[in-house]
Amino acid sequence: MTTASARPSGPRPELAAPAPAGGPAIVFAVAAVWSLAVARTIAVGTVVPWDSKNQVYAFFRFLAGALAAGGTPFWNPYTYGGLPSVADPQSLVWSPVFVAVALVDPAPSLRAFDLLVSAHLLAGGLALAALGRRRGWPAAACVLAAAVFILGGAAAGRLQHTGMILSYAQAPVALLLISLALDRRSYLAALAAGVAAALLVLGRNQAALLLCAVVAAAAVAMLAPAPRPLARLRTRLGVLATMAVTAVAVAAVPMLLTLQLAALSNRPVVTLADALAGSLHPANLATLFAADVLGSHGAYYGPGGTASPDLFNTDDSFNYLFVGGVPMLLLAWLGLGGGGVLARGARLWSAAAALALLYMLGRFTPVFALAFAHVPGVDLFRRPVDGSFVLTLALAMLSGALLAAYVRDGLPRRPWIAGAVAVAALAGLAAVAVRFAQASGHAGHALAALGPAFAVVLAAATVLALGARAGRRDLAAAVVTAIAAAELLGWNAAFRLNAEPREAYAALEAPAGADAAVIAVVDRALAAAHAAGDRPRVEVVGLGGAWQNLAMVRGWEAVNGYNPVRLGAYDRLVAPAEENWRFGFRRFPESFAGFDSPLAREIGLGLLVLGAPLATLPGQPHLPAAEPLLEGPRAWVYRLPGARPRAEVRPAGAARITAWRPDRVAVAVEADGPATLVLHDLLYPGWVAELDGAPAPIGPVAPLFRGVAVPAGRHAVVFRFAPLSTDNLLVALKGLAGPAPAAPAR
């Protein structure tokens, strides 16, 4: 008879294990944990802050508004003079759930946006629980894995980075569907798996790249456990081909358009030195089980940011890894001390966790430098700490696998030796953090934060030991899962790194008070200009984060905004940068020597919305003539004279915009002789024109704009953005979408 503390000889294969009972209970428990986290956020009146709202929510509102207007969301004219949203990874254009909601809600709320993002995490957690159930895990192990996935590590600290969160949430869904397709030889599941894999690829971020590698490795591992893996492979070639063809079919066009944008964008070449500045400092590893050891829940004093010149591309949110005392106890005691990390069901995830950790540490190990030099795609990104998404996924899977092994087999054969290994591992992580804290005079705080963390670890260890001794390992597993969920909810739900008052972003949703007054002034000025047939552009500077991309929500055609991707030529000539939330960061290169420069007037810059008086804005070559429309206290709004009309005929004639939407501009033209219709909108591949209903070539007009040759007389010209046209896709495919050729001197 096997004792409670002994393991049977040889590990059990998990992929073929029958699914245990309790599926509905698992779903209910996972949904309950998720619901409690969401309820806490709602109860305290917070929303996910920073990039989530200032950047991605604004794109979501543009998406919904463009669809409601009967157009496409493929070209966004409300930021940086115009951007191809169809190619921008941040735009949500290729995110089915967001598109579906945008089709029925023209103005989604901040809360709706957060719930959609969080629902993706719930779906990923449920998929992870289903994977565990298919491996024969008990209910507690499935729930633990899902809770760690939904609330742990990067899912909490990086919640503002919507694109990476969506990629992270997609990975377990892809894994589950691949598993179903291979095990059942189901072509329907293979189609679904191909779509899921394509959506993961379409994250087009570093987390997506790394998670794709993990999913691919897991798919290979799913074929390996069979007694005859080659025979298993042969019988599933059709299923694998279906997955691959579907994934390519779904992802190919969006990826091609993104490559086209990348070739024309401002994105610089990333050097190894730049990337290493995004490394994880070893001191941050203690946050895996001690949430506040470096002040993450108060005044952060850990590595990263301006305090660490060699790690300036990280901050407290990037460096927050908390998954809780229970998962780390399982990893250290049953995994490292007891050898569980080498069991068949855990090997892949142990390897993934180890490689992710080495990758994240960046400059502190040689692994990232080797990957940067030799692994395709790694040199496109500048933060190895993004590997935290892989680490969190791997720790979630390991937590479930190790707890399942405990329920099945009990404690390691030599629990005290394994316990000593666990104590040494956790104490070592703690010591590194305390030493770092000591250097800045925060050792006392670090030690105080470690006390509760080790108390949770000790309590969980006691429960597991008593459960093993009493033969109630299933009950002990349920108790420690409850402890883990409570700790994750207590530390990671609605805290400083993922929650700010909803009112801080009210300008994006329901502006009130001073914000509403400023917006009303701008709206009235633009409405009057539109009624007169003009379309002036706006520049917003120094009004805080929520105003960075407010133009997308309000329908203001903005000269600047907040997005890391901008058209390269525009970025060089206009120099809008992405620090518009702060007053004083506007640069004025020779090509844009003031708000009344020739280029500013050609762009049609007609309104300034500033957080302080225009005369106090530093760096201006001179003070332009400007008519004040509002003078404080919240903002200063100015009308700039002299802006060129959006459409004009050169050398002689008249032009009038007769219809306008983001992806289509119709112009009535009257030319005195052969002439050029100049539209002061940015030239970009995919824009096509029609002259009196017939296709007409678009030519460049220096330095940034579009032109169409027109004969004498009256004509109708229509510009339309058609990025999915065969012609544009062939241009992108052939690599012909380089910088637009220079126009002749005027």
Image (cartoon, rainbow, N blue to C red):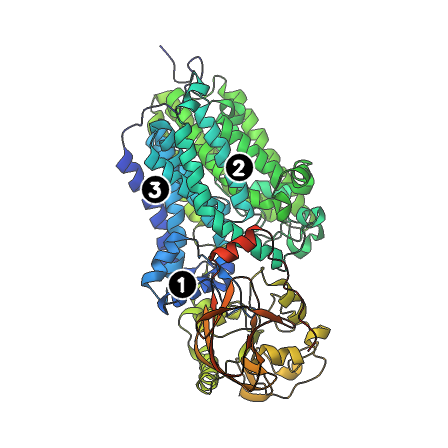
Report the disc number at residue 110: 1
Q: Residue 201: x, y in percent?
A: 49, 45
Q: Nearer the viewer, residue 63 or 116?
A: 63
C-alpha span from label 3 to label 2? 27 Å
* 475 over 506 or under it: above or below: above
Query: Which tag is nearer the camera, tag 1 or tag 3?
Result: 1
Q: Residues within 10 Å of mark 1 (few under 14, many from 20)?
A: many
Amino acid type of the residue that numbered disc 3 sits on in the rendered structure: Val
Image quadrant holding the C terminus, namely: bottom right
Relative to 130, is 541 on the left or the right?
right
Q: Is residue 168 above or below residue 617?
A: above
Q: CA distance from mark 1 to mark 3?
A: 24 Å
**In the drawing, does residue 99 fall left or right of residue 338?**
left
Residue nearer the viewer, 258 or 672: 672
**Upstream in sequence: badge 3 or badge 2:** 3
For label 1, the SS is helix
Which structural element holds mark 3? helix
Query: Which amino acid does the dot numbered 1 rest on?
Result: Leu
Is residue 317 at least partly visible in the picture? no
Closer to viewer: mark 1 or mark 2: 2
Q: Look at the picture and state if 3 lies above or below 665.
A: above
Foreground mark, 3 or 2, reads 2
Residue 394 is left or right of residue 274, and the answer is left
Q: Residue at x 27, y 32 (%)?
A: 22
Q: Position of residue 258 (x, y in %)?
A: 54, 54
User: Pointer 3: what residue?
Assistant: 30
> Which residue was labeled with disc 2?
213
> SS at mark 2?
helix
